[in-house]
Image: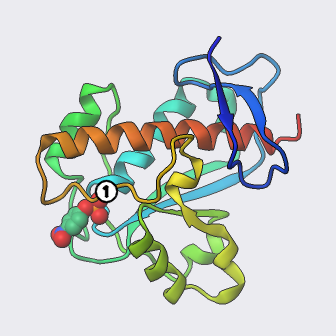
Amino acid sequence: MMFVTLARNLGVSEITRLPTTGCDDSFGAGRARILERKVLFVCLGNICRSPLAEGVLRSLVAEHPELEDGLRIESAGTSAYHAGDPPDERMREVAEGHGVSLEGQRSRQVREADFQIFDLILAMDRANLEALQRQAPAEVHAKIRLMRSYDPIQGDDVPDPYYGGPDGFEEVFDIVHRSCCGLVEELLLRRGD
Ligand code: 4NP
């Protein structure tokens, strides 16, 4: 069984070793339910990184329907550049190549209400984190974090692939997938097992 060390696990006071979940391994028996969590992924355009994160987390949770209870997963952009558009075709192709569907998603801009609705708002990079912090009331800043705070491999930003080549989209998939696996482990931890 493969193990991952989540040294930077938010809300956990010591280094914790847990089986990886849904990624290279299966969710452990007895880890049937998670606490209610509402997660919003945010990037600039809401057509590449954050729709991918939404799709990856949905696919990980869908493998284990018992985990779906109380979980709400959405994505949005700090800009309205692509409002109403489906995810970028290059991102859709890479996602589908890994068995993840982004079907049915449409870009939307972050709304004021999101800061009240969601428990966890995950920005894909520091620029979007700062944009969210400027927009959000101070009392909700604690729930705005970087996506890669859940990545067991060190790094701050999920790089913007929009103006780059195909390798950039594959790199984004790897980072987002690892981070979603880390997030699932965090959600399981918070059940208090
Ligand atoms: P995303 O990528 O923020 O990951 O959706 C981008 C999409 C569009 C643009 C920039 C980044 N744009 O400049 O239109």
Vertical comparison of 10 with 66: above or below:
below
The amino acid pointed to by label 1 is Pro
Q: Who's the residue at 18% across and 58% down the image?
A: 162
Residue 133, image x and y in percent? Answer: 54, 82
Q: Who's the residue at 54% across and 23% down the image?
A: 63
The outermost residue toward the right is 192
SS for dot 1: loop
| Quadrant of the image containing the N terminus | top right
Q: Is mark 1 within 8 Å of ligand 1?
A: no
Q: Is residue 134 visible?
A: yes
Q: Could you tell me how many numbered marks the image carries?
A: 1
Q: Is residue 82 left or right of residue 192?
A: left
Q: Is residue 180 left or right of residue 9?
A: left
Give 37 or 136, whichever is nearer the viewer. 136
The outermost residue toward the front is 154
Ligand 1 found in image quarter: bottom left
| Quadrant of the image containing the C terminus | top right
Q: Which residue is mark 1?
A: 159
Q: Who's the residue at 35% across and 46% down the image?
A: 52
Give 99 or 20, whichever is nearer the viewer. 20
Q: Quadrant of residue 30?
A: top right
Its colouring scheme is rainbow
Q: Is residue 103 visible?
A: no
Q: Quadrant of residue 45?
A: bottom left
Q: Who's the residue at 35% across and 32% down the image?
A: 100
Q: Quadrant of residue 161?
A: bottom left
Residue 22, image x and y in percent? Answer: 57, 24
Residue 27, image x and y in percent? Answer: 67, 21
Vertical comparison of 60 with 15: above or below:
above
Residue 26, image x and y in percent? Answer: 62, 17
Give 58 or 53, whichever is nearer the viewer. 53
